[in-house]
Image (spheres, rainbow, N blue to C red):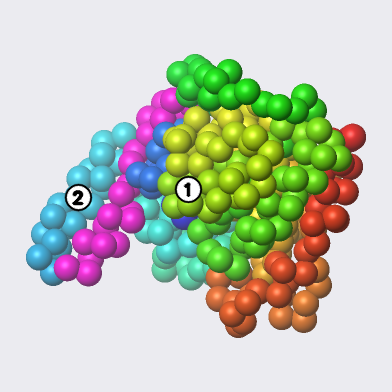
Amino acid sequence: MSAFGDIICALPVLRALRDEYPHIRIGWVVDARFKELVENDPAIDTVHVAPLSRWKKMARSPKQWPRLLAERRALKAELRRANYEVCVELQGILKSGFLARMAGCAKTVHMGSGRLAKRRWLFPGPRVEQDGPHAVDRMLPLARALGADTGNPRFDLHIPGDAQAYADAMFEAHDFQASGPLVALNPGAFAEHRMWPADRFVALARRLKDELDARIVVVGGPDDVDLAEGIVRDADVNALCTAGKTSLLQLAGVLSHCEALVTGDTGPQHMAYALGKKVVALFGPANPESTGPYGDEHIVIQKPFDCQPCYAHPTCDDYPCMKAIEVGEVVAAVREVLGR
């Protein structure tokens, strides 16, 4: 309900349930912004779209309240008609709890570690305690509580053929001047305190080209176009820029070509490791044990500060924890993960 990285982290729950019970019917409730990540997944029978971002805007305007209430009633009716027997509530936050109640299932299992998970008026039913701090390990026990085997977590992010073909064509059309590994750089994020300075990405691209003969791909969403194009221009290493040119699944197709990704704490990080790619994650305020790359083959770079973690509400303006990360150590980390 919050970010597409959460959806990636939830995929092992879906795979475990589908593997254990191949004949059950599975529905997935998703925010409208991220529906493409799950709407073509063969393990999901029905996708229910909850336009929560739009509802939030509508709630600010009294004139929109009748329409808002009508849309909420329509989603509730849709979920009730599906006659689901069990609801797996994966986040323990207000939005997911609200939708779990709306589904009206006879049984709901909740994550035991969410911010609001202890409020039983919102989350009636059993809580399932986490295996570890990472989001994947917080969610997986919910599948195990329903009898599924979670010993071999799998993401298996599904990329439709047309999305992969679109990404393939971008690479075929670009004439790289290097012949080394394909390394993706993701300079953007939804919050500034998760972003490494742009001039560091420029220097990183140059050094990866000079020292590893790397072919550079700069990725990002629609809000990252100016940032990404500026890095490509200033680095002058004939990088391929896909920022603002891809949907989420087309981005997955782009990352499927790459061997490694350098990124901050943001969605493409989760997408890359779900595709089996090596990740060098640059962390500042947040806790990488919770939202960092999943698995031992990746590298997290974070400089210790007494104020960490501060998550969504940093107490400083210039984010020294991100600026303390040096280009040389990122180059060394990329070299190391490529060798693993």
Relative image position of residue 151 (x, y in whole percent):
76, 35
Q: Is residue 79 left or right of residue 192?
A: left
What distance separates the C-alpha of mark 2 from that of mark 1? 34 Å
Please tell me whether mark 2 or mark 1 is closer to you in this view.
Answer: 1
Question: Which quarter of the picture shows residue 28?
Answer: top left
Q: What stretch is highlighted in magenta?
A: 39-61
Q: What residue does disc 2 label?
A: 71
Instruction: Indicate the amino acid at tag 2.
Output: Glu
In the image, residue 27 sits, relative to residue 131, either above or below, namely: above
> Tag 1, which secondary structure?
helix
Relative image position of residue 29 (x, y in whole percent):
40, 42
Residue count near mark 1 (Cα–Cα under 10 Å), binned few <14, some 14–19, many ≥20: some
Please give the name of the residue rendered at 17% of the width and 68% of the height, measured from the top-left corner: 61
Question: Which quarter of the picture shows residue 114?
Answer: bottom right
Instruction: Indicate the amino acid at tag 1.
Output: Val
Please give the name of the residue rendered at 79% of the width and 42% of the height, measured from the top-left corner: 208
Q: What residue does disc 1 label?
A: 225
